[in-house]
Amino acid sequence: MDLKDIQNLIKFVAKSGASEVKLETDDVKITIKTGGDEKGETTTYVQQIPVGAPVAQAPVMQPVVATTPEAAAAAAQSEADSKYITIKSPIIGTLYRKPSPDKPLFVEVGQTIHEGDVLCIIEAMKLFNEIESEVSGKIVKILVDDSSPVEFDQPLFLVDPS
């Protein structure tokens, strides 16, 4: 809305006899108040509503692939881990690897497990939930320490199904 449109609107409101008119568009908010008996006295408030300027996105830099021995070892490790089945946490809570402090661990690295074997316990809201294996195989890696908090879908164990 330009200045001529605003002036025409003010004249129209003053002639119509309305005491107050409010107009709001996407970018302009106008309030026109006229004096009831006083001829020709009009008060106008024009307020520009700030519109967020479009944000220019910075070009995304592609990461440089490191060819260090550590990077090669990490890539080889992820490829080696891909043949394993990852057992993930079904709930949020605190993971315990023992049924009680004086008992032995449920499972250890290198141990063969069968479907339905208890792998650990996750405490959630004072309830102790036994986490059972859904696959048979050999425990290759334990990814979480005893008595540590776990998130939903967090990897807990790597199992070699062969």
Image (spheres, rainbow, N blue to C red):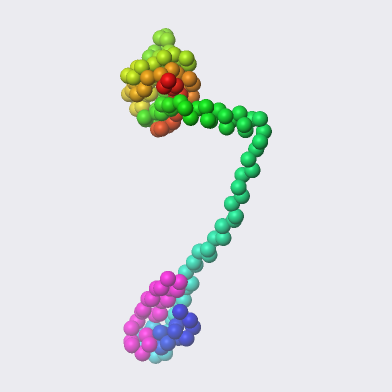
Task: State the image coordinates of residue 108 (x, y, percent, origin top left).
Answer: 46, 14
Query: Is residue 18 inside the magenta stretch?
Result: yes
Query: Is residue 50 inside the magenta stretch?
Result: no
Q: Quadrant location of residue 36?
A: bottom left
Q: Which of 60 and 130 is in front in this view?
A: 60
Task: State the image coordinates of residue 16 (x, y, percent, origin top left).
Answer: 33, 88
**Numbered marks: total:** 0
* Residue 154 drawn above or below residue 104: below
Give the residue displayed 42% in from the left and 10% down from the top.
Answer: 104
Q: In this rendering, does residue 147 appear at all?
A: no
Q: In this rendering, does residue 31 appear at all?
A: yes
Q: Quadrant location of residue 120?
A: top left
* Residue 60 drawn above or below residue 43: above
Task: State the image coordinates of residue 69 (x, y, percent, origin top left).
Answer: 66, 30
Q: Quadrant location of residue 38?
A: bottom left
Give the residue displayed 52% in from the left and 27% down from the top.
Answer: 80
**Dividing the image into 4 quarters, which one contains the C terminus?**
top left
> Magenta segment, which residues?
12-33
Q: Which of 49 and 122 is in front in this view?
A: 122
The residue positioned farthest toward the front in the image shown: 162
Horizontal side, residue 69 vs residue 116: left or right: right
**Dividing the image into 4 quarters, which one contains the N terminus?**
bottom left
Q: Which of 52 and 108 is in front in this view?
A: 108
Horizontal side, residue 77 vs residue 94: left or right: right
Give the residue displayed 38% in from the left and 14% down from the top.
Answer: 99
Horizontal side, residue 73 vs residue 141: left or right: right
Task: State the image coordinates of residue 46 (x, y, percent, origin top left).
Answer: 46, 76
